[in-house]
Image (spheres, rainbow, N blue to C red):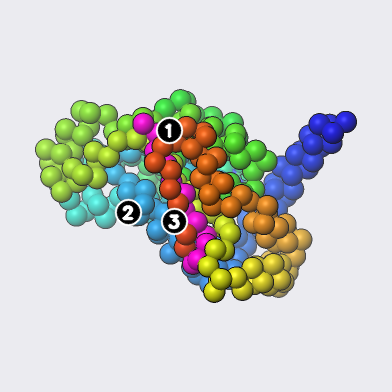
Amino acid sequence: TLSGFKEVREEEKSQMVGNVFSSVASNYDLMNDVMSGGLHRLWKDRLVSKLNPFPGMRHLDVAGGTGDVAFRILESLNSVSRRAVQDVLQDNLQEETQIYVCDINPNMLNVGKKRAQERGLEDLRSLRWVEGDAEALCFEDASMDGYTIAFGIRNVTHIEKVLAEAYRVDNMTRVKPQEVMILCSNLPSCTQLVLKPGGRFLCLELSHVEAPEFLRYDYYSFSVIPALGELVAGDRESYQYLVESIRRFPPQDMFASMIADAGFQKVEYENLVGGVVAIHSGLKF
Ligand code: SAM
């Protein structure tokens, strides 16, 4: 039947995605730099600056792979803490901060753990590595102050399920009222940052080029990326699959509607490099 056919296709897709990331894990970070000319670093910086992380937060980075986004959140927290928090308070808050990196592929997480060790982050209790599926998260309802997913959602089988799970685990308010009071009495400069209500949802994804001057990126991605995959990672097919998934991903406005349908409010998006990449965001009130 048609639905039987659909199920097989979906199973195949999940398996294909698994194979792709098992095959690319060890080359993943190098390929990211090669394919984006290093720009993915700036895009992830932008994502984290929009998240506006705060000390003591519980954050979930889904499809977190080798930890790029999680490391940036921790670095950003460290700089906020250094700037504004007294030493004693900083110790307390660091104990509470929890950044979960969740990914379906253990190979990617293992590369991430190694990178964390190299950066001297492995002892930090703030960082936790969890193997899991974005479509069925193993976290409690309303347990997170923030949720990010970078270059992950276009590979999943059911985007709607991922968004429903993001909404489920996100909290209504970013911090408990008593924590706001502790922070604000010590940190007047952070009041605005901490008081923002609503669990945050942020998604960074390769998207659809809107500005004509960037249309040549289409040519670049569909012809050059698979060739680079073959050259650098010895794996043309996996990279062919990855670029094809960009084409199938819904355009910016449609994806924004899907996020709103999942329940998030104040949904908006920012195009970077003319729409090569977009950051969608929403809040749970
Ligand atoms: N977020 C990281 C980054 O930006 O560097 C990694 C992005 S990588 C392109 C996509 C990741 O999504 C891979 O690590 C893959 O294993 C993961 N992934 C794919 N399907 C997933 C799913 N259903 N649940 C969780 N992770 C998934």
Q: What whole-number distance in Å separates the C-alpha atoms at marks 2 and 3?
A: 21 Å
Q: Which of these two is toward me, 82 or 256? A: 256
Per the rendering, the mark at residue 76 is 2
How would you rate the neighbour count of disc 3 (Cα within 10 Å): few for under 14, some for 14-19, many for 20 or more?
some
Evaluate whether residue 36 shows in this view: yes
Residue on which disc 1 sits: 170
Q: What secondary structure is the stretch in magenta mostly built from? A: strand
Mark 2 or mark 3: name the one nearer the start of the chain. 2
Quarter residue 236 falls in: bottom right
Mark 1 or mark 2: name the one nearer the start of the chain. 2
* Residue at 70 percent of width and 58 percent of height: 244
Quarter residue 143 falls in: top left
* Residue at 56 percent of width and 71 percent of height: 212
Q: Which of these two is toward me, 143 or 223? A: 223
Q: Would residue 67 appear left or right of 188 to someone viewing this image?
A: right
Residue type at mark 3? Glu
